[in-house]
Structure formats: structure tokens, C-alpha cells
Amino acid sequence: MSKAAGQPLPNAFSKVVDLLVESRIRIDAMEQILVKTNSVAYELYLGAIETLRAQKAAEMKKILTVRLKSELSEG
């Protein structure tokens, strides 16, 4: 068993949260630079983000629907 696999879950979860926060800070900083340097590119970026959010929502809905149907058929 690897050392990383033996770590307690809360420690691993904490590291994941730390990475997510660090990534969010970097994305926010890059977004601010984009706003100030190229407003057209920023508008395209916002459009891409909205498209990705819609795709994510559709995928989650599909996954949850399949999972619910599976659980209902088992029960």
C-alpha cells in the first residue's frame, strides 16, 4: 500500500479543498487580467463558462436519473 493511500480521508479531503481554493484564486486573478486587457476575449470566456455549466448540469441530471432508476429497480 502506498503512503498516500494510507492517509486518512480528512487529510486527503483537506488537500483537495486547498488545491481547489488555490486554483480558484489563480482563475480569479487571470480573469481580472483578461477583463483589463481584452474585453472581447473576456466576453468569449464568459460564454464558454456558461456553456460548460449548462453541459455539466445536463450531465449531472443524466447521471442522477440513471442512478435513481437503478436504485428504484433494485428496491
Image: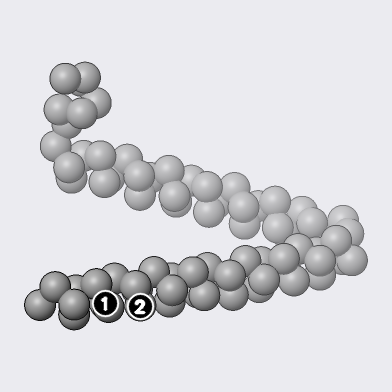
Circles 1, 2 touching at the beta carbon (< 8 Å): yes
**Left-right relation of 68 to 50:** left
Q: CA distance from mark 1 to mark 2?
A: 5 Å
Q: Is 59 located above or below residue 2 in the figure?
A: below
Q: Residue at x 18, y 45 (%)?
A: 10
Name the residue at the top extreme: 2
Seen from the viewer's position, the closer of residues 60 and 32 is 60
- 14 left or right of 56 in image: left
Q: Looking at this view, is 6 or 43 the one in front?
A: 6
Q: x and y percent of residue 50 in the render?
A: 66, 73
| Mark 1 crowdedness (10 Å alpha carbons): few <14, some 14-19, many ≥20 | few
Q: Amino acid at mark 1?
A: Leu
Residue 54 - label: none
The residue that label 1 is drawn on is 68
Lateral position of residue 5 relative to residue 45, left or right? left
- State the SS at label 2: helix
Q: Is residue 13 above or below residue 43?
A: above
Please provide percent x and percent y for residue 30: 70, 51
> How crowded is the residue under tag 2: few (<14 C-alpha within 10 Å), some, or many (20+)?
few
Q: Is residue 44 left or right of residue 65?
A: right
Residue found 15% across the figure and 27% down from its top:
6
- Quarter of the figure with the N terminus: top left
Colour approach in the figure: one colour
x, y percent for residue 29: 65, 52
Residue at horizontal 81 percent and vertical 66 percent from the top? 44
User: Can you identify the residue that label 2 sits on?
Assistant: 65
Does dot 1 land on a helix, a strand or a loop? helix
Q: Is 52 drawn above or below residue 75 in the view shown?
A: above
Q: Residue furthest front?
A: 73
